[in-house]
Amino acid sequence: MKLMLAKVAWDHPPTVNGYKRLAVRRGAWFGGFFTLLLLAALCLVLGSRTLVAGAWLMILLFFPVCLPWVSVAFLRRLRIKAILRSYPWREWPCLHLPYVSGSPVTIAIPFREDFTATFRIAPFPVYLAQKAKDHPDRIWFAGDPRFGGVVSPVGGHYPVRVVAHVPRREERGGEGFELALRVGLVRASGKGTRT
């Protein structure tokens, strides 16, 4: 393990820039759904029934399925920011595990010889090994190994949220529990958060 020079991950300029890009992407997704609504309303006002029918069909198909996920992703960007402002980046070896479908949604990080944590990228899977061209077997981690945190390819330029693949329940208290509770990595009950 190699400690970074910054006290917290947020002090690293490429991390701040990476977070800003993440916030813009998630804001665009969220705004895109409401743009569809405005487009349908505009077509309705202009009287174009063909365009209205197409727009409403898209809204009816995509809104109930996608809007909750996009809303969660948009709001949880604030949790990513809180984690980056509270924990330092640490470099660890990692293994990108393929999921049953072949999707690379899990990462295994050996924090100690007797403890390897498996994390799931939430809420949308990202293939971080492709983003880490120079160091696909290394990753930066900021957070609590028991509950999750934020990972990025070496350099901190692409931060994404990770949660424990199998939710853990810890006793309240102990080293680091209050900080994990404050930034949203764990609930008051001791169970790790899933988003």
Image: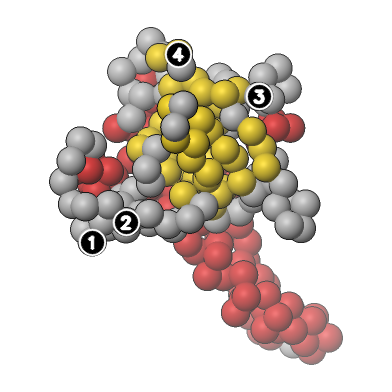
Give the x, y percent position of residue 174: 18, 41
> Please, is residue 193 above or below residue 57 in the view?
above
Give the x, y percent position of residue 36: 66, 71
The kind of secondary structure element at disc 1 is: loop
Query: Alpha-carbon neighbours of circle 2 within 10 Å: few (<14), some, or many (≥20)?
Result: some
Residue reaching furthest to the front: 114
Query: Alpha-carbon neighbours of circle 3 within 10 Å: few (<14), some, or many (≥20)?
Result: some
Label annotation for residue 137: 3
55 or 131, which lies in front? 131
Residue placed under numbered mark 1 in the picture: 189
> Is mark 1 in CB contact (under 8 Å) with mark 2?
yes
The answer to which image quadrant residue 33 occupies is bottom right
Residue reaching furthest to the top: 5
102 or 45, which lies in front? 102
> Is mark 3 in CB contact (under 8 Å) with mark 4?
no
Q: Amino acid at mark 2?
A: Arg
Q: Earlier in the sequence, mark 4 or mark 2?
A: 4
Q: Earlier in the sequence, mark 4 or mark 1?
A: 4
The kind of secondary structure element at disc 3 is: loop
Query: Alpha-carbon neighbours of circle 4 within 10 Å: few (<14), some, or many (≥20)?
Result: few
Query: Alpha-carbon neighbours of circle 1 within 10 Å: few (<14), some, or many (≥20)?
Result: few
> Please, is residue 108 above or below residue 52 in the view?
above
Q: Amino acid at mark 1?
A: Ser
Q: Amino acid at mark 3?
A: Asp
Q: Earlier in the sequence, mark 3 or mark 4?
A: 4
Residue placed under numbered mark 4 in the picture: 2
Q: Amino acid at mark 4?
A: Lys
Q: Earlier in the sequence, mark 3 or mark 1?
A: 3
Residue positioned 36% across, 24% down in the render = 88
Residue placed under numbered mark 2 in the picture: 169
